[in-house]
Image: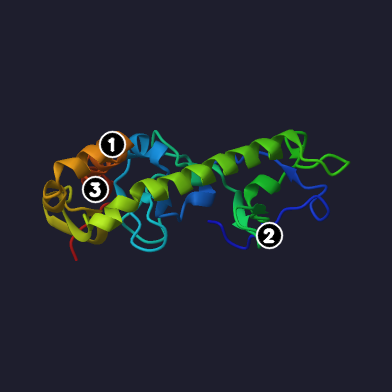
Amino acid sequence: MFENLELLDSENQRDLRFSPASDFCFAAALASAPLSASEVIDASRAFPVVFAAEGPLLPMALLSLKEGENAFVDADGTWLAPYVPAHIRRYPFILGNTDTPDNFSVMFVPDAPHFNTDGDVSERLFTEDGEKGTTLTKAIEFLSSFQAEVVATEKLLEPLAETEVLTMQRIELSDSEGKSVSFDGVRAIDKEKLLELDDATLGGWVRSGLMVIIDAHLASLRNFSTLAQRQGVTPK
């Protein structure tokens, strides 16, 4: 989704105009989305929430059991779930690292539908003087807030890696005909390892809010069956 990124600056994009996309076709091939901790409860009601197997340790909303497909975007681009992850809502902007630690530049997807604007519905991202317009200012505030939440989420989840309660698992499902379906490569909480932890550790996780994430994650795994049925996943 975030491909062919370019640096956004007032010199090169002074006249760039923006309007909200009318649909979610841009996310039609997105099979998963990273989540911040504050999103997990809402996301867990609609999607299976697992944990990233590679890269930063973050919760992930699974949007599909098939690569290159999003089960929650229909042919018209309508979003079919009650919650839209912030990762998708921030599109077509994203923060990019610079040479200075904790400093980020704003990147954008130049071929996003948000920039294919006609008529009076679009707004300039920059003023004639090169200052950030209202739309861009709000977008940057959203990006910064999400980035801060992601950093805090990584910190919150560190004990999961330290205690090794996260394991690669196979999810066993049944399709609409009652046939067995399995989904491999899911990084999830091992309930047995979780119960082996001492009370002091678990109590600390309750106080930090980590246990809320764990409970929502475990409850969300039942959404695998719904997702399999939605996509017509059948045994090979």
Q: What residue is pinned by disc 2?
A: 6
Query: How far is disc 2 from disc 3 in space, using C-alphas?
Result: 36 Å
Which quadrant holds the C terminus? bottom left
Residue at 59%, 51% (x, y): give it: 94
Callout 1 crowding tier (Cα within 10 Å): few <14, some 14–19, many ≥20: some
Residue 64 position within the rendered picture, expressed as x and y whole percent measured from the top left: 34, 53
Q: Which amino acid does label 2 sit on?
A: Glu
Does the residue at mark 1 contact the one at mark 3 (Cβ under 8 Å)?
Answer: no
Residue 117 position within the rendered picture, expressed as x and y whole percent measured from the top left: 72, 44
Depth check, front residue: 90 or 209 = 209
Residue 68 position within the rendered picture, expressed as x and y whole percent measured from the top left: 42, 60
Q: Look at the image and tell me whether residue 45 can be seen.
A: no
Q: Is mark 1 on a helix, strand or loop?
A: helix
Q: What residue is pinned by disc 1?
A: 212
Query: How far is disc 1 from disc 2 in space, using C-alphas?
Result: 38 Å
Q: Mark 1 or mark 2: which comes first in sequence? A: 2
Does the residue at mark 2 contact the one at mark 3 (Cβ under 8 Å)?
Answer: no
Q: Which amino acid does label 3 sit on?
A: Phe
Q: What residue is pinned by disc 3?
A: 224
Residue at 26%, 39% (x, y): give it: 204
